[in-house]
Image (tube, rainbow, N blue to C red):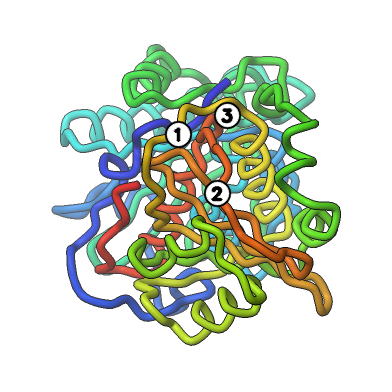
C-alpha cells in the first residue's frame, strides 16, 4: 500500500519567504488553551484529517503518550509522520462544519464498545493563534480520544458512528491519494523490497547507523551545491558532506526527528525507496538530505525525488555516486510536511 502520494502542496498552508530558522521540536509557545469545540467555533480555523496506523496511535487511548503532554506528543508524532499514511487539509467550510458536528454527535450518542482500541483517523484543528486540539477515532471499536491543551492524560471514551462520517473521511483521503489501513490490521502493508539491492547500496557500516540511530537531522538543501556528491565525489565524501551541512552551506531549513519510532519509520521509507525499482532521469538534483548518527558514527543520504536517485555516504565511502530510488512510501511528502511544520515561511522543495 502506498502512502501520501502528491500531498505536500495540498495539505499544508505555507507562506513563501526567506531562509528558515532551525527548530528541533514542535513550537513551544503555542496557545493551546481552547477545546476542540471552542476552536471550531472561532471565525477562522484550520482542520487537517490524517490516515494513521493504529499500532502507533492506540497509545493515546491507553494513556501511554502523556509526556510532555498528550497534545504535544500527538502533534509531534503527526509532524514527524510517525505512523501517518497521509493527510489532507479540509479546505471547504461546509466540510469542516459537517465533520465537527458529526464528531460531537458521536460523543452524544455512543455506540456499543468493543474490547480494543485501534484508531485509523485523526482530526486536528488549529486556531489562528495556533491553538490546537485533536480527536482520534476508532470506528471499528466505537471509541474516540479528545485531546486539547488542558488534557493531562488521554483515554478513550465511548463514541458512536453518527452515520456517514467514516465514508466521508475515507473519500476525502482517497481523493487526495492517501492510503488507508484496512480494519483488522495494525499498520500499513509492507513494501516488497529488493533486499539484495538494498544491501549493495546501503553498506553494512551505514546500516549499523541507520537501523537504530541516536538522532536524525533532516535538511532542505540547494541542489546546485550538493549534486556534486552524485557524480563521483572523492577525498572523504562523508567529512565534506557533514562540514557543509552542519555549517549551513546552501541549507534552507533543518529540523530533527525526535521520536525514536518516527526515526525508525522514516528510515524504513528510505529503505523502501532504495529497495524498489525506479526509472532515473538524466540528472541528479537533490533537495533533501538525512544525517543519521549513532555514537561516533555518521551516515548521510541525499535524495533527488525528481530524478529518482539517491546517494548514501558513510565513513568507508571513497567515491560517492547516485543510485536509483523510487518513492513508494511517501517519503517526500513526509519530509516536506515535517520541514514546513517546523520552519514556517520556508519555500518547500518541489522534488
Q: Nearest the camera: 229 or 162?
A: 229
Q: Residue at x 23, y 34 (%)?
A: 97
Residue at the (82%, 79%) spot, across then down: 296
Quadrant (top left, top right, bottom left, bottom right) of the N terminus: top right
Which label sits in the foreground, 2 or 3? 2
Tell me if 59 is positioned left or right of 179 in this view: right
Residue 237: image quadrant is bottom right
Badge 3 marks a residue whose secondary structure is loop
User: Where is mark 3, residue-wise?
Assistant: 120
Residue 322 tag number = 2
At mark 1, the secondary structure is loop
Q: Are marks 1 and 2 in contact (CB under 8 Å)?
A: yes
Residue 306 at x, y = what percent?
A: 36, 41
| Residue at image coords 18%, 64% | 16
- Mark yes or no: residue 152 visible: no
Q: Residues within 10 Å of mark 1 (few under 14, many from 20)?
A: some
Relative image position of residue 340 (x, y in whole percent): 36, 60
Q: Is 7 situated above or below 28? A: above
Secondary structure beneath dot 2 equals: loop
Between 97 and 279, the one nearer to me in the picture: 279
How far apart are the two marked residues, 2 and 3, measured between alpha carbons? 37 Å
Q: Hey, which quadrant is residue 68 in on the image?
A: bottom right
Q: Please say if 50 is above or below 164.
A: below
Vertical position of residue 190 compared to residue 263: above or below = above
Amino acid at each position: 500500500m502506498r502512502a501520501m502520494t502528491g500531498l505536500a502542496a495540498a495539505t499544508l498552508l505555507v507562506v513563501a519567504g526567506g531562509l528558515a530558522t532551525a527548530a528541533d521540536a514542535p513550537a513551544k509557545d503555542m496557545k493551546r488553551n481552547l477545546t476542540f469545540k471552542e476552536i471550531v467555533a472561532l471565525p477562522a480555523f484550520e482542520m487537517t484529517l490524517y490516515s494513521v496506523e493504529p499500532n502507533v496511535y492506540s497509545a493515546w487511548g491507553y494513556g501511554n503518550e502523556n509526556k510532555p503532554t498528550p497534545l504535544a506528543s500527538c502533534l509531534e508524532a503527526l509532524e514527524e509522520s510517525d505512523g501517518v499514511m497521509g493527510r489532507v487539509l479540509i479546505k471547504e467550510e461546509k466540510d469542516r462544519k459537517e465533520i465537527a458536528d458529526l464528531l460531537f454527535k458521536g460523543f452524544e450518542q455512543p455506540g456499543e464498545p468493543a474490547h480494543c482500541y485501534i484508531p485509523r483517523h485523526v482530526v486536528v484543528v488549529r486556531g489562528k493563534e495556533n491553538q490546537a486540539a485533536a480527536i482520534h477515532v476508532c470506528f471499528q471499536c466505537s471509541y474516540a480520544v479528545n485531546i486539547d491543551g488542558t488534557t493531562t492524560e488521554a483515554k478513550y471514551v465511548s463514541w458512536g458512528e453518527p452515520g456517514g462520517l467514516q465514508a466521508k473521511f475515507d473519500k476525502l483521503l482517497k481523493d487526495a491519494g492517501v492510503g488507508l489501513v484496512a480494519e483488522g490490521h495494525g499498520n500499513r502493508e509492507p513494501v516488497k523490497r529488493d533486499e539484495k539491492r538494498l544491501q549493495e547500496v546501503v553498506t553494512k557500516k551505514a546500516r549499523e547507523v541507520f537501523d537504530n540511530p541516536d538522532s536524525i537531522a533532516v535538511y532542505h538543501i540547494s541542489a546546485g551545491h550538493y549534486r556534486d556528491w552524485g557524480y563521483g565525489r572523492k577525498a572523504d565524501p562523508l567529512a565534506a558532506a557533514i562540514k557543509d551541512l552542519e555549517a549551513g552551506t546552501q541549507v534552507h531549513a533543518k529540523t530533527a526527528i525526535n521520536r525514536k519510532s518516527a526515526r525508525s519509520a522514516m528510515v524504513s521509507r528510505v529503505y523502501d525507496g532504495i529497495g524498489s525499482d525506479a526509472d532515473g532521469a538524466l540528472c541528479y538534483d537533490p533537495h533533501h538530505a538525512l544525517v543519521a548518527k549513532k555514537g561516533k558514527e555518521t551516515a548521510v543520504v541525499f535524495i533527488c525525488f525528481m530524478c529518482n536517485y539517491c546517494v548514501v555516504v558513510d565513513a568507508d565511502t571513497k567515491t560517492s555516486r547516485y543510485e536509483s530510488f523510487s518513492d513508494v512510501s511517501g517519503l517526500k511528502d513526509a519530509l516536506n510536511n515535517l520541514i514546513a511544520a517546523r520552519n514556517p515561511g520556508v519555500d518547500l522543495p518541489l522534488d
